[in-house]
Amino acid sequence: MEISLQLQDAKPSAKIWRYMDLTKFLDLILNKAIYLRRIDKFEDPYEGYISEAYKADLENQYGSIQKEFNLAEEAKERLHSTHLYGLELLPMYAYASCWYLGDVESAAMWKLYGDNKNCVAICSTIYDLQVALDESDDDQGVIHLQKIRYVDEASAVDAKNYLKPMFEKRMSFSHESEFRALYLLRKGLVNLNRPLHFPQLKKEDVSNEDGLALSVDVLKLINKIYISPTADQHFHSIVEKILELAGLNGVECIQSELYKLK
């Protein structure tokens, strides 16, 4: 598996958390695979969105290319429109696993992503996520590991970076403090620089699956498992029994004391 890691101001040892219900937890540990959702299928319609500022910067970039290579206006426009349409298609070839980046568990994330009170949080690190994903033998795409950048209309853009729109979200989502594992199918990149004599693929003709699973080394991925602070009394022992049956009884399982007075 080819993996690209961009840390920015984060450290490899930084903690990341994945909050999930029991069904998703069982899927992870029994199938030893991380499920990733196609980002254009997320609730937020702005996932991978090409902003007006990004479009303007892209147009300026092609203006510079036209001058540098003395391109005719028609050729420049065809290159520009091909690139822009390829960018709009890219979210249909991109799959994400979203993690919370933070030193401690988050009360907001328990409420947002724990579908019911009997849920868990996987605690890992950026480094361990990278190592665990490296076990996959999938060669159809590239994994990009990176923090989400929260932006507004005044934020700087860079149209030279085709990944940027898929690692940006609106300020309204900043409470998620997201670290993203983005799996980008290589065939999606062809749409960015498809030869001009080829017909471009229509959006309605893209037939990629809504989600996919990448195999992982679960023992390398999971540092600790936290049980929801509102879980039923017996739920902790159920999770420990599941871990034992899955051959993962060495993984530390902790009852969250988020709402317990000390």
Image (cartoon, grey):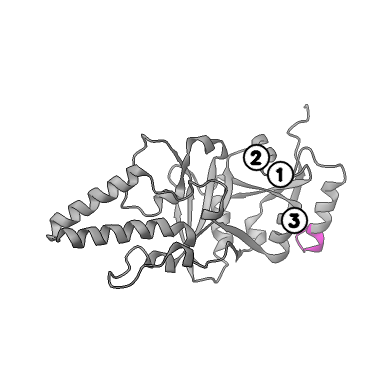
Indicate left or right for 90 with 259 as reference: left
Disc 3: which residue: 23
Disc 1 or 2, which lies upstream in sequence?
Answer: 2
Q: Is residue 156 magenta?
A: no
Residue drawn where x is 19% and y is 52% of the image: 63
Q: Residue at x 76, y 38 (%)?
A: 229
Which residue appears at 49% of the width and 70% of the height? Answer: 140
Count numbered badges in the picture.
Answer: 3
Q: Quadrant of the C terminus?
A: top right
The residue wearing badge 1 is 114
Residue 31 vertical position relative to residue 159 in the rendered view, above or below: below
Q: Position of residue 136 (x, y in %)?
A: 57, 68
- For residue 254, which quarter of the picture? top right
* Three-letter code, disc 3: Thr
1 and 2 marks in contact (CB < 8 Å)? yes
Q: Which residues are magenta?
A: 243-249
- The amino acid pointed to by label 1 is Gly
How packed mark 1 is, by other alpha carbons closer than 10 Å (few <14, some 14-19, many 20 or more), is: some
- Residue 174 image offset from top left, x and y in percent: 52, 36
Query: Which of the two residues, 255 or 209, is positioned nearer the viewer here?
Result: 209
Work out whether mark 1 precedes mark 3 in sequence or the reverse, and give the earlier one: 3
Q: For mark 3, does the 10 Å Cα neighbourhood hold few (<14), some (14 to 19), or many (20 or more) residues?
A: few
Q: Distance of mark 1 from mark 2, alpha carbons?
A: 7 Å
Q: Image height check: is 116 above or below 76?
A: above
Gap between marks 1 and 3 measured at Cα: 11 Å
Contact (Cβ within 8 Å) of mark 3 with mark 2? no
Residue at the limit of the structure toward the right, as seen here: 234
Residue labelled with disc 2: 109
Q: Mark 2 packing: few (<14 Cα in 10 Å), some, or many (20+)? A: some
SS for tag 2?
helix
